Image: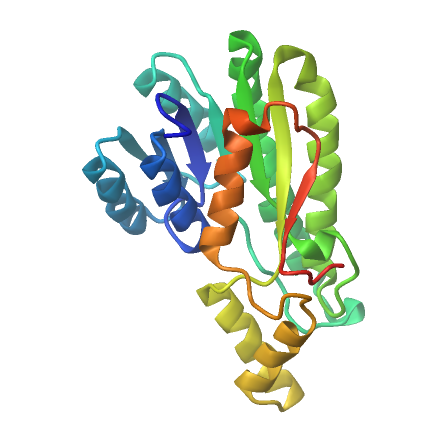
Amino acid sequence: MRLANKTAIITGAAQGMGGTITESMAREGADIVLTARTLGPLEEMAEKVRAMGRRAEVVAADVTDESQIVDVVARAKKLFDGRIDILVNAAGATGPIETPVWEIAAQDFEDLLRKNVIGVFLPMKHVLPTMVEQRYGKVVTLGGCSGMRGYRYRAGYSSSKWSLRGLTRTAALDVGEYNVNVNVIMPGIVETPRMQKLCEVKAEKRGWTYDEVYQEYVDEMALRRVTTPQDVANSTIFLASDESRNITGQELVVDGGWAV
């Protein structure tokens, strides 16, 4: 198992890509503190992790609330005897869909940046000191391919994902000398309920069918197939493992060739 005896914190750990990542990391041997805002799905996922023989603890928290993140990290250190090997930032939000810049409410734009950028910064801020002290750590953030190219009518979302590239590269420079790797995965459109909502809203606003919107995405991909949560989980495990020991400050694009 590639993550045997490793300890991890995963934000957004129960649903969508985060849920698949949690299960996959447990299968590879990691003990995990699972956090998100909603307790029920977290408890269900934690039971799956425990059924694999791994330690799991649930901490309900909002990644944009610093005091709550401090508590998550403290709980993880207590459970794992002071050690945190891996941080996966999987929590995030979608924001306005199919909306030109001039129609986006300023508050909606600000809220999205807070969830997608501050919600990554705070866990990194409070986990990295432990990784620096132990001279080992892997930080993996879920970004998005809209941070690799322009994304029409998604200014807030695209802005937030571009920001994560800068945060990742700078943090990698800050902690590299302490044997800590910091990378970001840039998924394209991923087969999750969030993609379903995206296609539904676009179809309604354009007067298209759901299938027409879905096929438009597929036609833009070199491989002509939509990314699955397992594709993203596989990449996360690679970056969280020692197989990626000399990779840091990088964007790993997992998008079927959408941003080519």
Instruction: Determine the residue positioned at 36% across, 25% down.
Output: 4
171 left or right, relative to 243? right
Instruction: Determine the residue positioned at 64% across, 70% down.
Output: 97
Q: Give the quarter of the figure containing the C terminus.
A: bottom right
Instruction: Report if residue 80 is visible in the image.
Output: yes
Residue 235 lies, in percent from the top left, at 53, 43
Q: Is residue 178 above or below residue 121?
A: above
Q: Is residue 56 above or below residue 12?
A: above
Q: Give the quarter of the figure containing the N terminus.
A: top left
The way the protein has been coloured in the rendering is rainbow
Instruction: Determine the residue positioned at 60% across, 85% down.
Output: 212
Quadrant of residue 157 in the image?
A: bottom right
74 left or right, relative to 260? left
Number of residue marks: 0
**Relative depth, front residue between 132 and 67:** 132
**Relative depth, front residue between 99 and 202:** 202
Q: Is residue 128 above or below residue 257?
A: above
Residue 245 lies, in percent from the top left, at 59, 23
Residue 32 lies, in percent from the top left, at 35, 31
Residue 138 lies, in percent from the top left, at 54, 26
117 left or right, relative to 130? right
**Relative depth, front residue between 59 and 150:** 150
Instruction: Report if residue 59 is visible in the image.
Output: no
